[in-house]
Image: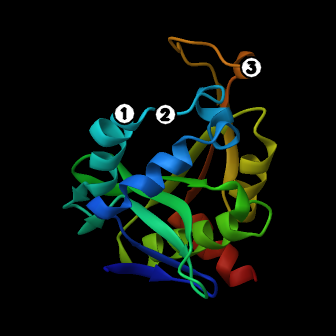
């Protein structure tokens, strides 16, 4: 197992082929998928063909993957995953922060803990200059997590999605944090 990052309660490690069933289970939960596709479970074929390959992809500009399996440190229980991947293939200057956790992990601060640790590692070790994150405008829990991780609201935008889901009429929101803003906030703490 290749550990990328540890926090007080989490281990973020590289995905491997053996994680397939964990990903199928995660993406089969309608509540987990609510703000992604309206709550439709992903098919096993979709996870095999699209999700798992994405999780296994390496980004040479960061010398790391862009997605990590999140496990509870004390038990080794799979909680979901975190995304911290370059927006542009060949540059680690701007990365996208994201996460998907199973319901058992909701409301326990894991998303914030993992996001803060990734932001810190990105700015301190990986050469990241800006972190960005998007969610549906109506996804108040994810918006709050972004704020707790230090990101600030940038804009609301409207995508041209093939299918509309409940709440999409309110648009998507972007949050971001620059390395300079992160340094300034760290000094003020």
Q: Nearer the viewer, residue 176 or 101?
A: 101
Badge number at residue 46? 1
Q: Tell me what residue is drawn at x 75 percent, y 69 percent.
A: 109
Q: Tell me what residue is drawn at x 78 percent, y 53 percent.
A: 144
Q: Nearer the viewer, residue 113 or 31?
A: 31
Q: Nearer the viewer, residue 7 or 103?
A: 103
Q: Are marks 1 and 2 in contact (CB under 8 Å)?
A: yes
Q: Position of residue 185 (x, y in %)?
A: 69, 73
* Side (left or right) of 73 relative to 137: left
Badge number at residue 166? 3
Q: Which residue is the site of mark 2? A: 42
Dividing the picture into quarters, in which one does residue 136 lie?
top right
Q: Position of residue 70 (x, y in %)?
A: 51, 69
Q: CA distance from mark 1 to mark 2?
A: 6 Å
Q: Secondary structure at mark 1?
A: helix
Crowding at mark 1 (Cα within 10 Å: few <14, some 14-19, many 20+): few
Q: Position of residue 82 (x, y in %)?
A: 50, 60
Quarter holding the N terminus? bottom left
């Amino acid at each position: 197992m290749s550990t990328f990052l540890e926090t007080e309660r989490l281990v973020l490690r590289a995905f491997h082929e053996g994680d397939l069933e964990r990903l199928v289970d995660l993406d089969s939960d309608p509540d987990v998928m609510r703000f992604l596709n309206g709550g439709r479970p992903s098919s096993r074929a979709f996870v095999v063909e699209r999700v798992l390959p994405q999780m296994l992809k390496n980004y040479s500009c960061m010398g790391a993957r862009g997605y990590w399996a999140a496990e509870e440190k004390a038990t080794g229980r799979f909680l979901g995953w975190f995304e911290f991947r370059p927006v542009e293939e060949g540059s680690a200057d701007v990365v996208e922060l994201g996460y998907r956790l199973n319901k058992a992990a909701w409301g326990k601060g894991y998303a914030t803990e993992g996001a803060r640790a990734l932001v810190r590692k990105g700015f301190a070790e990986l050469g990241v200059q800006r972190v960005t994150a998007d969610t549906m405008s109506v996804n108040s829990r994810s918006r709050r997590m972004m704020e707790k991780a230090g990101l600030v609201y940038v804009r609301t935008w409207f995508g041209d999605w093939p299918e509309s889901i409940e709440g999409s009429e309110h648009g998507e929101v972007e949050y971001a944090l620059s390395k300079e803003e992160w340094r300034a906030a760290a000094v003020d703490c």
